[in-house]
Image (tube, grey):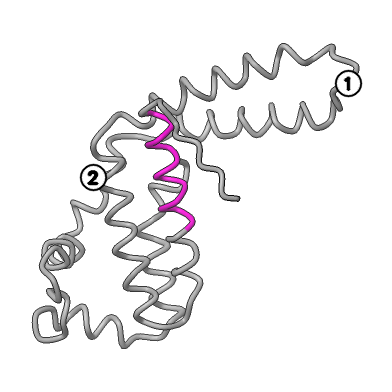
C-alpha cells in the first residue's frame, strides 16, 4: 500500500519541491551523457525559479532555529543518545553559519550569466535547445563529460548552502 501524506504548509511543500529538484540535479549531474547534463542544467533552472520566488534563506533560518529549539528539549532525556543529538545540533549550526554568510540574491547568479540566460529562454520553447537554435550550447555539449560536470557544478555553487 502506498501512503501519501499531503503537507498542508506551503513552506514545507516548497522545501519538499526543492529536495526533489536537488535529488534530480545530483542524479543527472553524476551521469556522463550530454543529455543527462542537459537535464541537470534544466533542473538547475527550475531550482533557480523556485528560489527566486521567495525569501528562502530567511525561511530556512527560521525553520532551523525551530529545529534547534526542538532538539534542545531533548538534552537531558535519558532515552536520547547524546552524541547523536549533538551531531544533529552541530549540523544545524554549520548550516545556519553557511546560510548567514550568503550574500545577495542567490537566484541572481544564473541571471547574470548571459549565455545561461539565452539557454534558459530557449528551453521554454519545445525543442528550443536544438543545435541549430543554440550552436554554442551544442558545442558545449560536445565537450568532455568532466568539463560539463565542472561547469554545471560551478553554476550550482551559490545554491548548495540551501
Q: Quadrant of residue 65?
A: top right
- SS label for mark 2: helix
In this picture, residue 31 sits left or right of residue 87 = left
The secondary structure that dominates the magenta segment is helix
In this picture, residue 4 sits left or right of residue 43 = right
Q: Residue furthest front?
A: 1
In this picture, residue 121 sits left or right of residue 24 = left
Query: What residue is rendered at 10% in x and 67% in y?
Result: 125
Is residue 125 highlighted in magenta?
A: no
- SS label for mark 1: loop
**In front: 28, or 118?**
28
What's drawn in magenta, residue-wise?
A: 11-23
- Give the residue at mark 1: 79
Numbered label tally: 2
Query: What residue is rendered at 39% in x and 47% in y?
Result: 159
In this picture, residue 114 sits left or right of residue 9 = left
Percent from the top left, x then y, of residue 102? 40, 35
Q: Is residue 24 above or below residue 91?
A: below
Q: Residues within 10 Å of mark 2 (few under 14, many from 20)?
A: few
Percent from the top left, x then y, of residue 115? 17, 66
Say which mark, if any, is on residue 108. 2
Q: Earlier in the sequence, mark 1 or mark 2?
A: 1
Could you tell me which quadrant the C terminus lies in?
A: top left
Amino acid at each position: 500500500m502506498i501512503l501519501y501524506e499531503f503537507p498542508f504548509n506551503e513552506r514545507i511543500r516548497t522545501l519538499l519541491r526543492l529536495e526533489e529538484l536537488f535529488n534530480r540535479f545530483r542524479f543527472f549531474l553524476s551521469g556522463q551523457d550530454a543529455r543527462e547534463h542537459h537535464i541537470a542544467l534544466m533542473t538547475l533552472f527550475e531550482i533557480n525559479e523556485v528560489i527566486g520566488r521567495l525569501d528562502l534563506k530567511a525561511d530556512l533560518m527560521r525553520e532551523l532555529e525551530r529545529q534547534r529549539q526542538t532538539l534542545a528539549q531533548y538534552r537531558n532525556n535519558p532515552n536520547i543518545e547524546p552524541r547523536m543529538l549533538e551531531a544533529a545540533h552541530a549540523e544545524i549550526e554549520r548550516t545556519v553559519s553557511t546560510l548567514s554568510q550568503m550574500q545577495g540574491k542567490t537566484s541572481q547568479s544564473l541571471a547574470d550569466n548571459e549565455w545561461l540566460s539565452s539557454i534558459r529562454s530557449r528551453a521554454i520553447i519545445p525543442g528550443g535547445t536544438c543545435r541549430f537554435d543554440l550552436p554554442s550550447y551544442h558545442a558545449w555539449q560536445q565537450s568532455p563529460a568532466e568539463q560539463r560536470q565542472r561547469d554545471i557544478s560551478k553554476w550550482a555553487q551559490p545554491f548548495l548552502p540551501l
